[in-house]
Amino acid sequence: MREKVEKAMEKVKMMLAADGGSAELVEITADGVVKIKLTGSCGGCPMSAMTLKMGIERIIKQEVPEVKSVEAV
């Protein structure tokens, strides 16, 4: 599953790079929770929670249906 998530993260990174941000994969738990760290301008952005759920989580779950949720660390 990690390989699929990393592939989906490439799409996420391209989307975030347009606004000067990025994200890095930290961990995938046994129960399907993907933990990422928002970096660049996304790290301190007040809209990062919305970006995480409405953008990043949506893309990753679309590409890797076995992912249960995506959380920021």
Image (cartoon, rainbow, N blue to C red):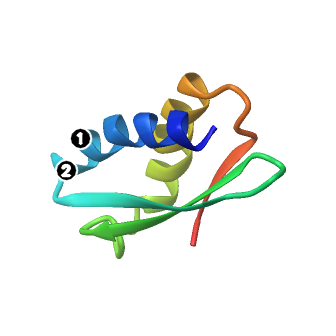
Q: Residues within 10 Å of mark 1 (few under 14, many from 20)?
A: some
Above or below, comparing residue 52 to residue 56 in the picture: below
Residue type, numbered disc 1: Met
The tag on residue 49 is: none
Residue at position x 84%, y 49% from top?
Answer: 31
Answer with left or right where residue 12 lies relative to residue 32.
left
Q: Quadrant of the C terminus?
A: bottom right
Q: Position of residue 45 (x, y in %)?
A: 34, 69
Within 10 Å of disc 2 (Cα), the crowding (few <14, some 14-19, many 20+) is some
Residue 70, image x, y percentages: 63, 50
Residue located at (53% from left, 33% from top): 4
Indicate the secondary structure of the residue bearing disc 1: helix
- Residue that badge 1 annotates: 14
Left or right of 67 on screen, residue 41: left
Q: Which residue is mark 2?
A: 17
Query: What's the residue at 27%, 40% (across, down)?
Result: 15
**Secondary structure of residue under mark 2:** helix
The amino acid type found where label 2 is placed reads Ala
The quadrant of the picture occupied by the N terminus is top right
Q: Where's residue 64, x and y in %?
A: 61, 28
From mark 2 to mark 1, how far is it between C-alphas? 5 Å
Q: Determine the residue positioned at 44% across, 34% down.
A: 8
Pointer 2 and pointer 1: residues touching (CB < 8 Å)? yes
Tally the marks: 2
Q: Residue furthest right?
A: 31
